[in-house]
Amino acid sequence: MKNLIPSYVRVPLIFAVVFAGMEFFIDSGDKPAFIKYPMVSLFLGVFLFLLVAIEIVISAVDKVTYQLLTEEQKKQLEEAQSISFTESKFYKSLTRSKSIEQEADVMLDHDYDGIKELDNVLPPWWVYLFYGCVIFAVVYLVRFHVIGDYTQKEEYEMEMMKAEKEHEEYLKTAPDLVNVDNVELLTDDASIEEGKKVFEANNCFSCHGQNLQGGIGPNLVDKFWINGGGVKNIFKLVSEGSTTNPVMAPWKEVIKPADIQKLASYIISLEGSNPKEAKEAEGEIWGEKTIEVIPTEQVEIVTD
């Protein structure tokens, strides 16, 4: 049996197509699917083994079948296999071209300085492609210009809405992207309320009081700050802890960065609330004109 594509090309090609398809359709995040999911590697290994085994079996069957042929049948087979692809019936059905011996049948009367013109028919594949384009154009015309389906603007808006929903779903499971460099103050009621829940859920009131008036820890509602005020410094303090007070441990392994941002915003929202039994001020007055995070080595050590 004559193969247009050798087995040493066919096997890697089929395997590559299956491999690429699995990588495309299986969502494996930032790792290849065959690494993240062992079953994918197992499947690919078994699939490759079967491909090689099938090729070996087919080759063995061809050899056995060939040995069973008579000399005349072998000669006919060799003659059939000696025909090139361009001379095959399949190729000729695609082009419908005439051989040199048949050019007289399609020769036109035009003669340009001895150069004659042939009236060959168009290749069937080109004709069918042209018909397909005509059908597509008619359907498109009726759908968008007669019936009046969605416009390009409406399609754009639908795609944008879809992208926004996908982005929202991604953010629900994506790693937190908030850090001390890009954290911003949140002022909406929903974020402030979430920050309050974070404050209560992590027992921050045990040191700073239910109304942030202070206790074991400092007062958080006045303008005085030991480690610097503002959303960036508070975010850094909660995330990494205080170098001046070991009681204030780092919380970055417990609270997500996005929740620390909400917590810091909640604390700032209560500035100036003056709760009862507020603890005496500690540290220095913090002004909004200072926008940089205070370096750790410049923090004044305060002992309780």
Image: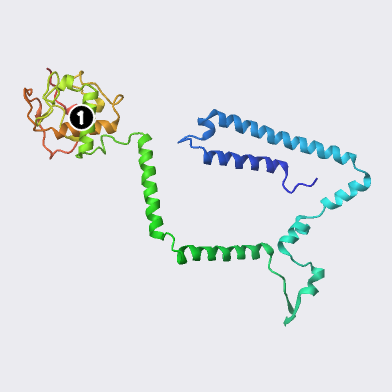
Quadrant in the picture for the C terminus: top left
State whether residue 83 is above or below residue 107: above
Quadrant in the picture for the N terminus: top right
Residue 64 rendering spot, x and y as whole percentages = 85, 37
Q: Is residue 293 visible?
A: no
Residue 35 rendering spot, x and y as whole percentages = 52, 31
Q: Which residue is mark 1?
A: 196
Question: Could you tell me which residue is drawn at 29 percent across and 31 percent down?
Answer: 257
Is 36 left or right of 71, judged from the image as shown?
Answer: left
Is 191 left or right of 226, judged from the image as shown?
Answer: right
Q: Is residue 110 visible?
A: yes
Question: Could you tell me which residue is drawn at 74 percent across and 58 percent down?
Answer: 91
Quarter residue 293 falls in: top left
Residue 10 rendering spot, x and y as whole percentages = 69, 43
> Badge 1: few (under 14), some or many (20 or more) residues near its Cα, within 10 Å?
some
Give the residue furthest to the front. 147
